[in-house]
Image (spheres, rainbow, N blue to C red):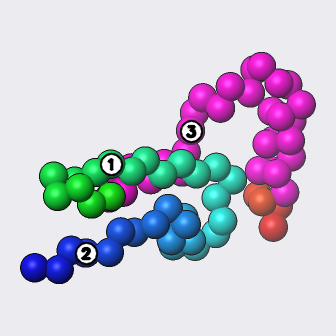
Amino acid sequence: MPTRPMLRPERAVAACPEPPLYARVNLVLTNASNPAVMELELIEPELWLRFHPPAAMQMTDVQANLISI
């Protein structure tokens, strides 16, 4: 039985209608040792922005620009 081709992280993120501001793709190996997407995370509540305040302002500016479109 042929194995299903792996859904590469780039393809998973590219399937979004709009490019995400943040994305993380977790991969695991199946019992047959094939890589598989375990989690596609597009929202991260803890980006550690408190450690670099300018990054928080940059994220806010990008989000504000998206809302005003």
| Vertical order, 18 against 68 (above or below) | below
The residue type indicated by label 2 comes to Arg
Provide the secondary structure element on which disc 1 rests.
Answer: strand
18 on left or right of 65:
left
Q: What residue is rendered at 17% in x and 80% in y?
A: 2
Residue at image mark 2: 4
Q: Is residue 63 above or below residue 14?
A: above
Q: CA distance from mark 1 to mark 3?
A: 20 Å
Disc number placed over residue 44 in the picture, else none: 3
**How many angstroms separate mark 2 from mark 1 (CA)?**
14 Å
Q: Earlier in the sequence, mark 1 or mark 3?
A: 1
Across and down, in percent, residue 55 comes to 83, 34
Q: How busy is the neighbourhood of tag 3: few (under 14 within 10 Å), some, or many (20 plus)?
A: few
Indicate which disc, 2 or 1, sits on the residue closer to the N terminus. Answer: 2
| Residue 39 x/y as whole percent | 39, 49
- Which span of residues is magenta-colored? 36-65
Q: Tell me the amino acid under the disc marked 3.
A: Glu
26 within the magenta span: no
Q: Earlier in the sequence, mark 3 or mark 2?
A: 2
Residue type highlighted by circle 1:
Val
Residue 60 pos. (x, y %): 81, 41
For the view shown, which residue lies furthest in the top direction? 51
Residue tagged by mark 1? Answer: 28
Looking at this view, is 52 or 68 the one in front? 52
Residue 69 in the image: x percent, y percent? 81, 67
**Position of the N terminus by quadrant:** bottom left
